[in-house]
Image (cartoon, rainbow, N blue to C red):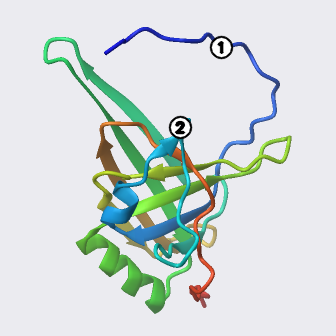
Amino acid sequence: MACAITKGRGVGCKTAFAGIKNIYILDFSAAIAALGDSSGTITLPTDNSAEFFKFEVKGGQSSLETVVNSSRENGTTFYESTLNVTFQNLDVATQEEIKLLNRGRAHYVVELYPDGAGNTKRLLLGRDNGAEITGGTIVTGAAAGDLQGFTLTAVATEVFPPFFCTEPDVSSATPITPA
C-alpha cells in the first residue's frame, strides 16, 4: 500500500462560517456501515430505508472535534470524533428520546452552516461502529440567562475520519416541538 500523499493545498478564500446548524440521528444500521464513499463522499439512501431524525441546534452551543490517534510503535491510526450538542428548553418528549439514545449507538450527520458561497457541508460520524453517548447533563440553570435544557456528548471511534455525505432523508419524521 502506498502511503505517499498525492496533492498539496493552497490557502482558500475566507468563506467559512463556523458552527453546527442541525444534527441528524439514525439508530445504528449495517446498511449505513456498508455504504462506500465516492471520492470521500458517502451518498445516503433517499428511499426511507435509512430515516434520520433531525434535531435543530443553535449556533455557538454545539461542536464537533475529531482527534487523530496514531502510533508509530504499534503501526495504528484511528480517529475519535466527539460531538457536543446542546438542546435548549426542557421537555418530556426530548428527554424520552435522549433516554433511548443513551442506551444504544447511532449514526450522526452533522450539518454545518452554509459558507459564504452557499455550500452546505455534512459529516457522517460513526459509519462503521456508530457513536455512543458518553455523557451529558439535564440543567435548569440558576440565573435568568442560564441554559435550561439538555447537553449530550457522543463519541465515535473509527478507522476513518468523519465522511462528507449527502443530505439525510427526514421526509416522514415528525419533529419534537419543545414547549
Q: Position of 17 compared to 116: left or right?
A: left
> Quarter of the image holding residue 74?
top left
Identify the residue at image location x=35%, y=56%: 33
Quadrant showing the C terminus: bottom right
Which residue is under mark 2?
Answer: 40
Of 6 and 161, nearer the camera is 6
Q: Please, what is the three-letter code of the amino acid marked with disc 2?
A: Gly
Looking at the rendered structure, the secondary structure element under dot 1 is loop
Q: Position of 80 compared to 15: left or right?
A: left
Q: Please, what is the three-letter code of the amino acid marked with disc 1?
A: Arg
Residue with the most extreme right position: 117
Spatial CA distance of label 2 from label 1 is 16 Å
Residue with the most extreme left position: 74
Identify the residue at image location x=61%, y=55%: 166
Percent position of residue 2, x then y: 36, 12
User: Is 48 placed above or below 125 here?
Assistant: below
User: Is 24 placed above or below 75 here?
Assistant: below
Quadrant showing the N terminus: top left
Comes first in the chain, label 2 or label 1: 1
Looking at the rendered structure, the secondary structure element under dot 2 is loop
Residue 157 shows in this picture: yes
> Quarter of the image holding residue 107?
bottom left
Which residue is under mark 1?
Answer: 9
Of 171 and 22, nearer the camera is 171
Percent position of residue 17, x then y: 74, 42
